C-alpha cells in the first residue's frame, strides 16, 4: 500500500510529488507524462517566481526534466473513482484498483462546465470513461463530447464498438479516423431522457442516442469522490489542504481561484506536508 | 498613495510583487535588494517546481534577475510600524511615513525567538530599530542582540552614540570596528528591570544597561502592527491571506508552517489577487 496517491500532473501535483519524494514517502502518481496540457497551452507566464517570462511549453518541459532528474514516475492511467474505506483509500482506474493510505486530489479545473442533465444522468447513460463503459454500447448509437485532442484514441476506441458515434469536439484540428463518426458543431446544450439517456439536444437539432461520453481533462471532484464536500464545484479545504474526508487532501485549481501556477504549486507543497503529518 | 505596500523580500514578497505588477497595481516594496538572507543561506533546494536542485544563493540570484527584468524596485528601508487608519494604512520607516490603501505582510519568521522580558520592555528600553531610538542612548550603556551580519553598520552607528556597547552576535564572522564594543558569548537569557530596562541577564553574568537593541531580520508581526491577530506568533489568515484587519494581508512564513519557498510564493500570489479584489 502506498503512503499516498496523487491524482493530477499539473503544478499542484508536481509540487506535491517533489516534496513527498524529499520527505521519503511512497506514492503513486496518476496523470500524463506530458504533464498538463493546460500548462503547455499558456502563451506567456510572467509571474512565476524563478521562471522569468516563459511560455507554457517551456515551463512544462522544465518541470518534466526536473521530475526525471528526481527519478519520479508517472502512471498514465485515468482515475475513475476514489473510495474512502475508513482505514485507507481505493483508487480505481477503469477496473484496476490501487490502495493508498491517503489521497491528494490535484485534478485541476475543467473550463468546460457540465451541461444540463450531464450530472443527473451520470451512470445512467452518461460516462466519463471510454475504456470503463464503452463495452456497454456495442452496436449502439452514442455521442462523445470531447474537450481535448489527447482523447482522440479513446474516441476511436468507442467508434470501434458502437455502431454510430456523434462527436462534439471542443478543440481544434480534429483528426479522428473512423467512418462511423459524424462531427457535430458547437457545444451540445442538454442531455435528456427518462430513466436513462435518450437524446442529446444541440443548438440546431436533437439526436437520439443510447449514451453520451464526456471526455475531459478534469472530472468534477464530486463525481470522482463520493461524499466529498464541494462548493460551486470547488473542493472545500482548510489551510492545510484537508477536505471533509479524513486522509483526503486537495490542492491547486480544484480548490478554487486564483487559477495560477504558483498558487497551485504552493498548495501542493502544503498538502505533501499535511500528508506526512497525517501519516 | 500606493495601492499596496509589500513588506518583505523573501519568496512570498517576490511572488506578490510579480503578480501585482502583472495586475497593473501600484506598490512600494520594502526589503533588501539582496532579497532574503535566509534564502541565500539554504544549502540545497530540491522541491521548488521549476528550479531543479539549486543552492539558496542560486535561487536568490535567479529571483533578483527576474525582478530586474520586470523593472520592479525595492525600497531598502526597515519598516518599524504599520498603522491601520480606517481608510488606508501608514507604513512607518524610522521617521518617514508612506501611505498605501492596503498592506501585504511578508516578513518571514525570525528563527530567534524573543527572550524573556523582551516583549514586556518594548518601548521601555527595548528597541528593534537602531536609527529610530539610538539617539535616546547618548553616552549611555546599551546591549545589542544581533541575528545577522547585515546589521553591523547599525551596531557601529549605535557605538558612535553610546558610551559602551555590549554585543551578543547570533551569527558568525563578527567584524564590527569600534573600541567601545565588548562581545558577549551566547544568547542572553533575560531582559530585566523595573519601570524601564535595568539589566541584561546572560548565562555567566548580569550586565547593567540602559537599553537593549534587538536587530533581527524579522520583527514579530504583532510588534509591527498594533491590533493584528496572531496565534503562537503566527499571523492568522484565511485562505485568501486576509487578516483580522481589513485591507491587511499576510503571506509566507509569517502565517505559519510549512516554512517552504514554494508555499510562501503561492501565498504571495494569492495575496496579490486578494488585494486586487479588495481594491
Image (spheres, coloured by chain):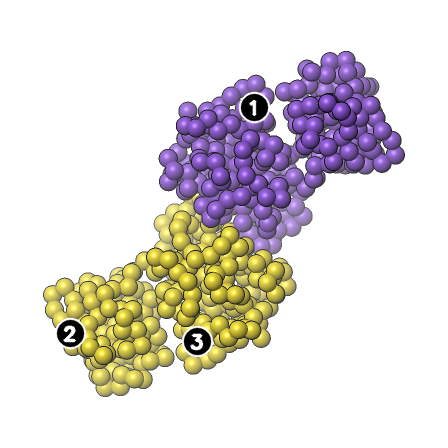
Chain colours: A purple, B yellow
Measured as percent of width and height from the top left, residue A146 is found at 72, 31
Where residue A209 appears, as percent x and y from the top left, is 79, 22
Where, quadrant-wise, is the C terminus of chain B in this rendering? bottom right
Q: CA distance from mark 3 to mark 1?
A: 58 Å
Q: Which residue is labeled 2 in the image?
A: B207
Q: Nearer the viewer, residue A257 or A245?
A: A245
* Dot 1 alpha-carbon crowd within 10 angstroms: few under 14, some 14 to 19, many 20 or more: some
Mark 3 = which residue? B93
Question: In the image, which is nearer the foreground, mark 2 or mark 1?
Answer: 1
Is A166 or B236 nearer to us in this picture?
A: B236
Residue at 54% x, 49% y: name it.
Answer: A263
Q: Which mark is residue A93?
A: 1
Residue B198 higher or lower than A151, as above or below: below
Both marks 2 and 1 on one chain: no
Residues packed near mark 3 inside 10 Å, few (<14), some (14 to 19) or many (20 plus): some
* Residues at marks 2 and 1, CA–CA distance in whole angstroms: 70 Å
The quadrant holding residue B60 is bottom left
Q: Chain of mark 3?
A: B
Q: Which mark lies nearer to you, 3 or 1?
A: 1
Whole-percent x and y of residue B188?
20, 66
Q: Position of residue A196 (x, y in %)?
A: 73, 22
Q: Chain of mark 2?
A: B
Q: Look at the image and tell me whether residue A232 can be seen.
A: yes
Please state the chain letter of the residue tagged with numbered disc 1 in the rendered image: A
Amino acid at each position: 500500500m502506498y503512503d499516498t496517491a496523487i491524482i493530477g500532473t499539473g503544478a499542484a501535483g508536481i509540487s506535491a510529488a517533489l516534496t513527498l519524494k524529499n520527505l521519503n514517502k511512497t506514492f503513486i502518481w496518476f496523470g500524463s507524462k506530458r504533464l498538463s496540457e493546460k500548462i503547455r497551452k499558456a502563451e506567456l507566464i510572467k509571474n512565476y517566481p524563478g521562471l522569468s517570462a516563459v511560455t507554457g511549453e517551456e515551463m512544462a518541459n522544465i518541470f518534466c526534466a526536473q521530475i526525471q532528474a528526481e527519478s519520479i514516475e508517472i502512471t498514465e492511467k485515468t482515475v475513475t473513482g476514489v473510495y474512502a474505506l475508513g482505514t485507507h483509500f481505493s483508487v480505481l482506474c477503469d477496473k484496476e484498483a490501487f490502495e493508498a493510505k491517503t489521497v491528494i486530489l490535484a485534478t485541476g479545473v475543467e473550463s468546460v462546465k457540465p451541461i444540463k442533465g450531464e450530472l443527473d444522468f451520470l451512470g445512467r447513460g452518461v460516462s466519463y470513461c471510454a475504456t470503463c463503459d464503452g463495452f456497454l454500447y456495442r452496436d449502439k448509437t452514442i455521442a462523445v463530447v470531447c474537450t481535448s485532442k489527447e482523447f482522440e484514441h479513446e474516441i476511436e476506441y468507442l467508434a470501434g464498438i458502437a455502431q454510430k458515434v456523434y462527436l462534439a469536439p471542443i478543440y481544434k484540428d480534429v483528426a479522428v479516423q473512423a467512418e462511423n463518426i459524424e462531427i457535430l458543431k458547437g457545444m451540445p446544450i442538454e442531455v435528456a431522457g427518462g430513466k436513462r439517456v435518450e437524446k442529446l439536444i444541440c443548438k440546431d437539432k436533437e439526436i437520439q442516442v443510447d449514451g453520451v461520453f464526456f471526455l475531459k481533462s478534469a472530472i468534477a471532484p464530486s463525481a470522482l469522490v463520493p461524499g466529498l464536500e464541494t462548493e460551486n464545484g470547488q473542493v472545500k479545504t482548510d489551510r492545510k489542504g484537508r477536505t471533509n474526508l479524513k486522509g483526503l487532501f486537495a490542492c491547486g485549481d480544484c480548490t478554487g481561484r486564483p487559477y495560477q501556477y504558483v498558487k497551485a504549486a504552493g498548495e501542493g507543497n502544503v498538502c505533501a506536508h499535511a500528508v506526512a503529518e497525517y501519516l
